[in-house]
């Protein structure tokens, strides 16, 4: 491993309001690839098993090591190490003892320095997760979170500036042949036009377990809607079940988390634009 100067790591600037995105120069990313990521474990065996499995299978940007946050981290307090943690937002119903964030956030965060309360200036990248995660949910949540973060870094290698929802280079044409799965009670369509017509594709309300199965099996025929709430927004997101490619992202007020007609129309327009 190359020795990574502290100056290079400090050049990573903080994340924009769109969670998992940041601004990094390609030269900085090349240097970052020579670091090692310390994956912080907890006292919860389900979380530990899930994050380990997801990182081992889907994280390909840096080398990794695993450590408990109660262990001696002195050996990792060097610029050639970064830290992958799970931060819980104020609105979350997650019983696992995990980290929090100076800027309210729920999901995985990659940090320059380990702190149980992540400081804004230490955040390199983020990936949203659900606010409610039970023992059986960790596997699918960590698969998506790790895939989202891996996708971000791989796309950022080709980008010239900040990646935002409007210029994120995932292939939106992937929506063309995929059924949209929406959690039960979170599809809100009013008027005479039904959801499939608004999307120009199949839409189905399903139990959350069905979405989890699609993620774990990496179902190539579906994409799904999920959301996460922080103290300012409800972040509404659609990703593919296979590889967690970002298809749609928008924000609404914290109490307006349903997938509605405007969301479906926006996805239809993005799909049509990508297929031109």
Image: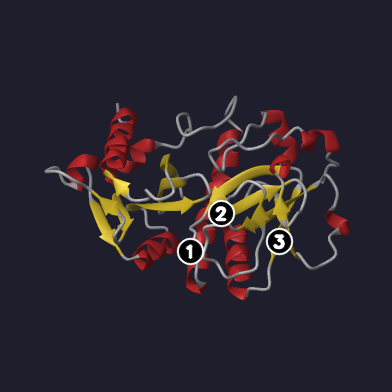
Q: Residues within 10 Å of mark 2 (few under 14, many from 20)?
A: many
- Residue 60 placement (x, y as % from top left): 62, 49
**Helix, strand or loop under label 2:** loop
Of circles 1 and 3, the one toward us is 1
In space, the residues marked 3 and 2 are separated at their CA atoms by 16 Å
User: Which is more toward the observer, 240 or 264?
Assistant: 264
In terms of sequence position, does the residue under pointer 3 or pointer 2 come before the other? 3
**Which labelled disc corresponds to residue 221?**
none
Q: Which residue is painted at 68% across and 68% down in the image?
A: 42
Residue 127 appears in the picture as rendered: yes
**Is the image coloured rainbow, by chain, by secondary structure, or in one colour?**
secondary structure
In terms of sequence position, does the residue under pointer 1 or pointer 3 come before the other? 3
Image quadrant of residue 44? bottom right
**Helix, strand or loop under label 3:** strand
Q: Residues within 10 Å of mark 3 (few under 14, many from 20)?
A: many
Image quadrant of residue 107? bottom right
**Helix, strand or loop under label 1:** loop
Residue 108's place in the image compared with 13, above or below, is below
**Which labelled disc corresponds to residue 132?**
1
In space, the residues marked 1 and 2 are separated at their CA atoms by 10 Å
Task: State if disc 3 and disc 1 touch (CB < 8 Å).
Answer: no
Identify residue for label 3. Answer: 40
Q: Residue furthest right?
A: 74
In terms of sequence position, does the residue under pointer 1 or pointer 2 come before the other? 2
Q: Residue furthest left?
A: 192
Task: State if disc 2 and disc 3 touch (CB < 8 Å).
Answer: no
Identify residue for label 2. Answer: 106
């Amino acid at each position: 491993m190359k020795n990574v100067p502290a100056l290079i790591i400090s050049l990573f600037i903080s994340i924009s309001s769109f969670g998992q995105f940041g601004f990094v120069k390609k030269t900085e990313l090349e240097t970052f690839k020579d670091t090692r990521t310390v994956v912080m474990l907890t006292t919860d065996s389900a979380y530990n098993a899930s994050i380990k499995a997801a990182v081992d299978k889907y994280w390909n940007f840096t080398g990794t090591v695993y450590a408990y946050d109660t262990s001696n981290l002195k050996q990792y307090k060097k610029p050639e190490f970064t830290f992958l943690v799970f931060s819980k937002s104020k609105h979350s119903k997650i019983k696992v003892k995990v980290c929090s964030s100076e800027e309210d956030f729920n999901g995985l965060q990659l940090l320059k320095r380990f702190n149980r309360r992540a400081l804004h200036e230490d955040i390199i990248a983020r990936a949203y997760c659900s606010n409610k995660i039970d023992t059986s949910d960790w596997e699918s949540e960590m698969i998506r979170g790790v895939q989202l973060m891996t996708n971000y870094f791989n796309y950022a290698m080709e980008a010239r500036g900040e990646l935002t929802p409007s210029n994120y280079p995932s292939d939106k044409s992937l929506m063309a042949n995929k059924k949209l799965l929406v959690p039960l009670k979170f599809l809100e369509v009013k008027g005479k036009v039904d959801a499939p017509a608004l999307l120009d594709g199949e839409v189905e309300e399903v139990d959350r377990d069905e979405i989890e199965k699609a993620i774990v099996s990496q179902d190539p025929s579906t994409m799904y809607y999920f959301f996460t709430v922080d103290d300012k927004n409800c972040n509404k997101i659609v990703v593919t079940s296979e590889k967690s490619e970002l298809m749609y992202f928008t924000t609404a007020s914290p109490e307006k988390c349903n997938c509605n007609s405007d969301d479906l129309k926006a996805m239809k327009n993005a799909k049509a634009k990508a297929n031109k």
